[in-house]
Every structure is written in structure tokens, then in C-alpha cells.
Amino acid sequence: MSMNNLLPYGLGNPELVEVQKGYFVDAAIVDDLNKLIEAAREAGFELRLESAYRPFEKQLSIWNRKARGELALLDAEGNPMERPADEEELMYAILTWSALPGASRHHLGTDIDVVDGKACPPGYEVQLTPAECTGMFAKFHEFLDERFGSATSFGFDRVFVPGRGKIRPEGWHIAHLPTSRKRLENFSLATLKSIYRNTDIACKRVLLARLDSLAEDYIYPYFV
């Protein structure tokens, strides 16, 4: 398989551009992202990235560290929870807030997590939780709501919204949909299964056994 066909899984060699320090996106979305950043600035906000392109190995590390208890597991309300002993329960606990490695939209280079840098208190460490969206970043999300609702967001929109699949809503996660749709054209669940068989991934047995049904709840609903 060519390296281009592996791009949807966070593998291969995407054409990336650093748009803010340490944060890279697909070159195809840079102009539109800069337009959205400028529109936010004119409205009094500092659109700051908290996550952008994420390769397979980074998503795998997040997944495995959560499985080992090295990173916190959060419940549906965003609160820390006990690590389940049962492998299948653990898998679903991780999926509450973390995408499957190889199926994360952050692999596409078209999706970013954003906050209002101006609203962050000095020294504050962003958590990316629903409470932040309705709290310190509420005005910023009202700005985004207006832009998305009026189709003046330069191709960006939310993906993880209520009623779509089983991943909890993530107001901070936005995607450049015209470009992401192109990047997802080569996605294949059979290829993802093959990647898992050859990867040291936590919960591998249950992941492979449940992947078809997982895709219906945690992958395909967000390929919009």
C-alpha cells in the first residue's frame, strides 16, 4: 500500500505546515485557518490551538498510557474515574474521550482543538472539558456558533456534536470539512484491522473482536 493511502491512519508523510508553535496542520487548510484566526481576532478573541495533527504513534501512546493508568481516565462528565479491571470496560472507558488510534480525525491534519487564549488565566492549564466550553470560553464558543450557523467559518465546523455516535460532544474540536472529506476517501476498516494486528496496542483482543461494531458508533458517524 502506498504511503498516501496510509495518511488517514496517521501514517505516511502528510504535507504539514506549522501554524502556531508546535502545532502542524495540512497545508491545504492554512489559508482558511488564518482567515478564521483573523475573524476571531477582530471579534476580540485569540484563537489558540491546543491540538492539531497527531500521528498514529502519538495517538497510540495516549491510548496505551490511559490503559496502563499513566494518564487519567475521565467519565462522561469529564471527571476522573477508576480504571476498570475488565478489558472491554477499559476499552469503552478510554473511548469516552479518546479516539481509536488509526481512526482519530487528528490524523488527517484538518482538525484542531481550539480555545480563546485571551480568556485563560495566567498559568492556567487547559483541560478541554465541557465545563470550560460553558465557562471561561463561553463567549468564544458563541462566536464559533454564530460563524458555523451562518456558513462564514471558511469551511470549518464542529464534528463531535450531540446525537452523532457515542463519542462525547467536543465543542473545542473543529474540522476543515472540505479537506477532511478528501483525506478520508481512502479509509478502510480492513486496513485498520491489519494495522492493529501488527501493533502493540492495549485491549487488542477485544478491539479486533469488536471493531466492526465500534466503527458504527465511534468512527463512521464522524466521517461527515
Image: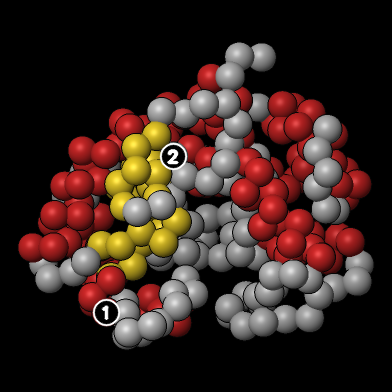
The reply to whether dot 2 and dot 1 touch (C-beta < 8 Å) is no
From the image, which quarter does the C terminus lie in? Answer: top left
Left or right of residue 19, residue 98 in this image: right
Whether 22 is drawn above or below 73: the answer is above
**Residue extending farthest top:** 2
From the image, which quarter does the N terminus lie in? Answer: top right
Whether 62 is drawn above or below 81: the answer is above
The foreground one among 67 and 216 is 67
**Quarter of image, res 90:** bottom right
Secondary structure under badge 2?
loop
Identify the residue shown where x is 51% and y is 60%.
163
**Quarter of image, res 115:** bottom left
**Residue at numbered disc 1:** 119
Left or right of residue 46, residue 159 in this image: right
**Residue at numbered disc 2:** 109
Whichever of labels 2 and 1 marks the residue nearer the N terminus, that label is: 2
Q: From the top left corner, tell me how far across and down residue 100 is, in percent.
A: 67, 49
Looking at the image, what colour scheme do you see? secondary structure
Q: Looking at the picture, which amino acid does disc 1 mark?
A: Ala
Residue 208 makes an appearance in the image: yes
Q: From the top left corner, tell me how far across and down residue 135 is, in percent.
A: 35, 84
Secondary structure under badge 1?
helix
Left or right of residue 36, residue 219 in this image: right
Identify the residue shown where x is 13% and y is 54%.
38
Label 1, residues with CA under 10 Å away: few <14, some 14-19, many ≥20: some
Whether 167 is drawn above or below 79: the answer is above
Q: Which mark is residue 127?
A: none
Left or right of residue 117, residue 183 in this image: right
Q: Looking at the picture, which amino acid does disc 2 mark?
A: Gly
